[in-house]
Amino acid sequence: MAFGTETVYGLGGDATNGAAVAAIFAAKGRPAFNPLICHYPSGENAFLDAVADTRAMALAEKFWPGPLTLILPRRAESKVHELACAGLATIAVRVPAAGIAHALLAQVDRPIAAPSANISGHVSPSMAAHVMEDLAGKIAAVLDCGPAQVGIESTVLDLSGAVPVLLRPGGVGIAELASVIGDIAMPDADSAVISPGMLASHYAPSLPVRLAAVAVGADEMLLAFGPALNGAAGVFDLSARGDLTEAAQNLFAGLRVLDAEGARIGARGIAVMAVPEDGLGIAINDRLQRAAHPRG
Ligand code: TXA
Ligand code: MG
């Protein structure tokens, strides 16, 4: 069943049940080598499956519940099914913000594996209607929890080694993390193997995406940030007043709206205005770069 979290909608299933986990991979068309995040109602619950060191404890204290996922060594006694962790010795754990997701997790009282509730590689869902666009007929239900407050996925931080590595920028900023645990390394070329979800092409609409647009063609759709450029076939403004929090909330809806409208009117592609590379802008640009990446 899909449900809303503060980041994006997730497609949830009992992480300890192999058939449930397999059904998640099947519905999304997700490659089985790409592990899932396990969701918990509290840090205490999460650390029954993952080994927390002092860094993990400090981050959990500060940012949970909230948009942060920690990659930690998996406990030998954890009942999370191997398929959820793609056979890795590590596990991804997260405690979503209070609200319906929290109530659901507390009620079921077991780890819930939940990737974003979209077809694998497609734009993530920030509302229940987006989930239905992608997965209607393939899943049992979606719990409508309203529009996601953050709008982009959790920050994924790998704490399984001596040096913390940022695997995915997201709802919690890098500077905020560093203020608690010090230096954080950026992923190198090998990280795509460590975190199989870091594929270059992801979050992809069907129309081609062009970044850092300073002018726009009459046959292009425009994803604007701040005052929109003139002349596009259609416009979606992420934030007319140039606010990054508002832009993150609107990002996936904007890509979906422009993609559908652009395909309907025969537009050539989606042009995207520059978004500043700081705070949430880092996570927004990460998603836009993957959306623009040539498809493999
Ligand atoms: O905000 C979110 O994190 C949402 C909501 C539903 O919680 N979930 C989400 O899940 O974005 P998903 O599956 O779309 O992204 C999970 C990312 C993938 O890039 C995956 O490769 C990585 O986390 N990941 C999961 N387990 C991992 C592990 N053990 N080691 C490294 N990376 C891992
Ligand atoms: Mg995803």
Image (cartoon, grey):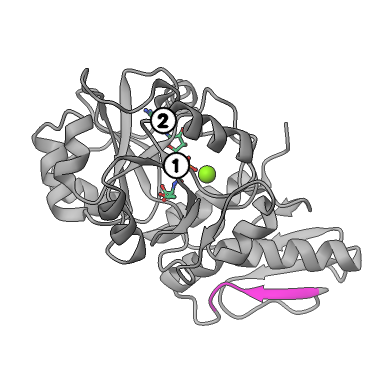
- Is 171 magenta? The answer is no
Q: Is residue 2 left or right of residue 107?
A: right
Vertical comparison of 215 with 197: above or below:
below
Quadrant of the image for the C terminus?
A: top right
Q: Position of residue 111 (x, y in %)?
A: 31, 40
Quarter of the image holding residue 99?
bottom left
Badge 2 element? loop
| Amino acid of disc 1 | Gly
Residue, disc 2: 17
Dot label at residue 13: 1
- Per the rendered image, the range of residues in magenta is 234-239
- Is 235 magenta? The answer is yes
| Amino acid of disc 2 | Asn
Q: Nearer the viewer, residue 122 or 248?
A: 122
- Who's the residue at 52% across and 53% down the image? 285
Q: Is residue 185 left or right of residue 238?
A: left
Label 2, label 1: how far apart the Cα atoms are = 8 Å
- Who's the residue at 49% across and 70% down the image? 147
Q: Position of residue 290 (x, y in %)?
A: 60, 44
Q: Nearer the viewer, residue 46 or 179?
A: 46
